[in-house]
Image (cartoon, rainbow, N blue to C red):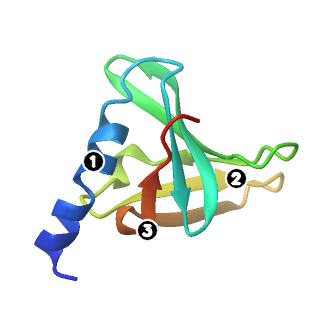
Amino acid sequence: MTYNAQLKATKSIREAIANLREKGQEVTIKYRGSKYIIHCYSVFQDEVYLVVRTKNGMLDESMNVHSDKTSNLSITLYSFDMMKTRTDYKMKFIDMEIVEGE
């Protein structure tokens, strides 16, 4: 799929994430068969802080969104384990879909 075709196909997802501008707002997505919540947990001096959490009941794992590594095609996530080892993951918008009503 061409770059422009990907931009067109993912416009609603990119806009939904970009519109998370107030604490507590969230969007539920499906990514490669699993459900996730992209949640705005803080806004400080016009900087928006988002977190992506799993939506599978009892186990609540999360990764932070690296705001300066968000592109037109993906968002970059990161987390640290208890040994302070950083893990990065890139979620492609083309692999996401918005889950309505959840």
Image side of residue 20 versus residue 85, left or right: left
Which numbered tag is attached to residue 12? 1
Kindly identify the residue that appears in the image at 18 percent across and 63 percent down: 7
Residue 78, percent from left and from top: 57, 55
* Residue 74, percent from left and from top: 36, 62
**Where's residue 73, x and y in %?**
29, 64
The span from disc 1 to disc 3 (Cα, nearest Å) is 13 Å
Whichever of labels 2 and 1 marks the residue nearer the N terminus, that label is 1
- Upstream in the sequence, badge 1 or badge 3? 1
Q: How far separated are the C-alphas under marks 3 and 2?
A: 24 Å
Q: Residues under labels 2 and 1: Cα distance?
A: 30 Å
Mark 2 residue crowding within 10 angstroms, few (<14) / some (14–19) / many (20+) = few
Compared with 28, 69 (above or below) is below
The residue nearer to you, when weighing 80 against 90, is: 90
What kind of residue is marked 2? Phe
Looking at the image, the residue that sits furthest to the right is 58
Q: Looking at the image, how many numbered discs can be counted on the residues? A: 3
- Quarter holding the N terminus? bottom left
Residue at which label 2 appears: 80
- In front of the other: 44 or 100: 100
Answer yes or no: do the residues labelled 1 and 3 have beta carbons within 8 Å?
Answer: no
Q: Quadrant of residue 51?
A: top right
Assess disc 3: are there few (<14), some (14-19) or many (≥20) residues with their C-alpha within 10 Å of its C-alpha: some
| Residue annotated with mark 3 | 95
Tell me the kind of residue under disc 3.
Asp
Dot 3: element: helix
Give the quadrant of the C terminus: top right
Give left or right: position of 87 versus 98. right
| Position of residue 35 measured from the top left corner of the image (x, y, whole percent) | 62, 53
Occupied quadrant, residue 52: top right
